[in-house]
Amino acid sequence: MIEVKNVVKTFDGFRALDDLSMGVQEGAIYGLVGPNGAGKSTIIRHLTGIYRPDSGQVLVDGEDVYENPGRKARLAAIPDDWYYFPSASVLDMMRFYRGFYPSFDKDRYEKFKEVFSIPEKSLIRRLSKGMQKQVAFWLTMCCRPKYLILDEPVDGLDPVMRRQVWSLMMADVAEYGTTVLVSSHNLRELEDVCDHVGILSRGKLLLERSLSDLQENIVKLQAVWQTPEPPALPGEMEVLHTSHVGRVYTYIVRGSAAAVQQRLAPLQPLMLEALPLSLEEIFIYELGGEHYAVKEIVL
């Protein structure tokens, strides 16, 4: 299990992480999302033992990960800007990884040649960004880590390879219980693979729930009322956003679909329909509703 307990990290007076606490259960695929500057890459550098927190703890299987080779051996990471030696080939980097990870699986490396189809003597610096990312997955997954930490992992990959990479990772989760923490702005893709989500903003965790619980706690309703002007909604309802096109009103409301519909039923709408929200919509409205939504600028 990964545990982050009350972590604070400050850079030149700017508090990048502000008393952050979060937890990633074993065998989970955890999506870490947030706006630019929220602290996602900073906490990932703590999880991989690159940064030491100013205060608080970052624990992997109950031990601090910073300067702990035993715990770092259980982790493998692919950062947004993956590092490789400038003069290295795929084969050179394989040997480098194998020297650091006792669990490195050479047989898997050979099998993955068929998946990635990149000559192992190719100089990595001469490969395209997408092919470099393929090499990163090829080598990292051969380390057979217990915890796989990813920052914008499939950026640069074509659609077929994106699906291939996710398929390989999910197979490892199912078969070996690998725990995956992935930070990405591609919320549509995370929605397909993650079972837990944490929303980070300004160095704090706004919420941390299973994706199913998150989707059940906020609902989009479309309603048509009997009068041109909509009636006042019950005061106890927490309405995050309201919009309308003609007489069709759309409400984003906190609560379950059944409970919200039951509260609105006495107002006798001509039409009332609950619609599922995407993770992207939940992300926008949890971060502040209309104040965070796309702004229309007249030029």
Image: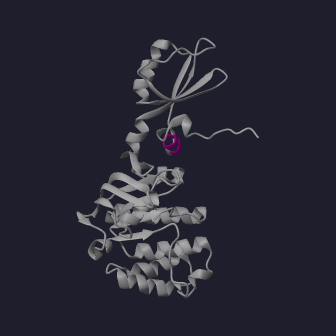
Q: Which residues are magenta?
A: 280-284
Residue 247 appears in which quarter of the rendering? Answer: top right
Position of 206 relative to 274 (above/below): below
Colouring = one colour
Position of 44 relative to 203 (above/below): below
Name the residue located 37 percent from the left edge and 85 percent from the top edge. Answer: 99
Residue 292 at what x, y percent from top left? 55, 40
Position of 9 relative to 84 (above/below): above
Name the residue located 45 percent from the left edge and 78 percent from the top edge. Answer: 111
Q: Of residues 103 and 61, which is closer to you in this image?
A: 61
Q: Residue furthest right?
A: 299
| Residue 109 seen in this snapshot | yes
Q: Of residues 44 and 218, which is closer to you in this image?
A: 44
Q: Quadrant of the C terminus?
A: top right
Residue 142 appears in which quarter of the rendering? Answer: bottom left
Residue 138 at what x, y percent from top left? 47, 75
Q: Quadrant of the N terminus?
A: bottom left
Q: Residue furthest left?
A: 62
| Residue 25 seen in this snapshot | no
Q: Find out whether residue 167 is within the magenta segment.
A: no
Magenta stretch prevailing secondary structure: helix
Name the residue located 62 percent from the left edge and 81 percent from the top edge. Answer: 126
Residue 117 at what x, y percent from top left? 56, 78
